[in-house]
Image (tube, grey):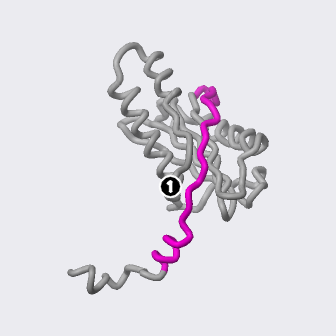
Amino acid sequence: MDLAKELPSAVDAEGLLTLAEGHHDRAARPLGTREVAGHLVKAYALEAPGRAVVEKDTRAALRIAAGHLALGRERGSLGLSVLLVHAGGDGDYLLLHTWTEGHMADLAIFTGPAGRPESLRPGRAGLAPCVWEAALLAHERDAYSRHVLTGTGPLPGRLTAWSADTYAGDVR
């Protein structure tokens, strides 16, 4: 198929171009690594233009993460997680990515209306990270592989390096 002349029927050209026209960078900043329900949790704020992650958002996210991680061992958790607190353009999102046995990961997504962290609830089945969240999770996949899986030396040093390897700046 010559894509310059013809697109497959399922390609929504108008929808893709509309997304491209409205695409923008989002600010990301680390919120530190802390112990939550026996896990090391590296947290980030991700902010749409005009939105900000504030302390009450972070507190609510950590409370939700603690509840989810409480059964982590029973679900194969290895004790390392990444928490994204996303003040999105259309609402608030919380993503909790936990490394599990067998080189796998568990991803929990919570959604709610903007500015109401007490209303965050589990997202619908099949919901996946948006393009900005996926960029942060890609950084975290690389940091985990680099420092924990292929790093050298005793584990505490590897975990310290993993914790310090954070993303800050604009996410495209």
Residue 11 location (% of width, % of height): 38, 79
- Residue 82, by quadrant, is top right
Is 127 above or below relative to 80? below
Please give left or right for residue 154 compared with residue 123 in the image.
left
Please give left or right for residue 78 compared with residue 31 in the image.
left
Residue 59 location (% of width, % of height): 75, 39
Label 1 CA crowd tier, 10 Å (few <14, some 14–19, many 20+)? few
Please give left or right for residue 150 compared with residue 2 in the image.
right
On the image, numbered disc 1 is attached to which residue? 172
Residue range highlighted in magenta:
15-39
- Reply yes or no: does residue 23 show up in magenta: yes
> Residue at coordinates 60% horizontally, 49% vertically from top-left?
27
Asked whether 19 or 158 is in front, the reply is 19
Q: Amino acid at mark 1?
A: Arg
Residue 106 location (% of width, % of height): 48, 44
Is 55 above or below relative to 35? below
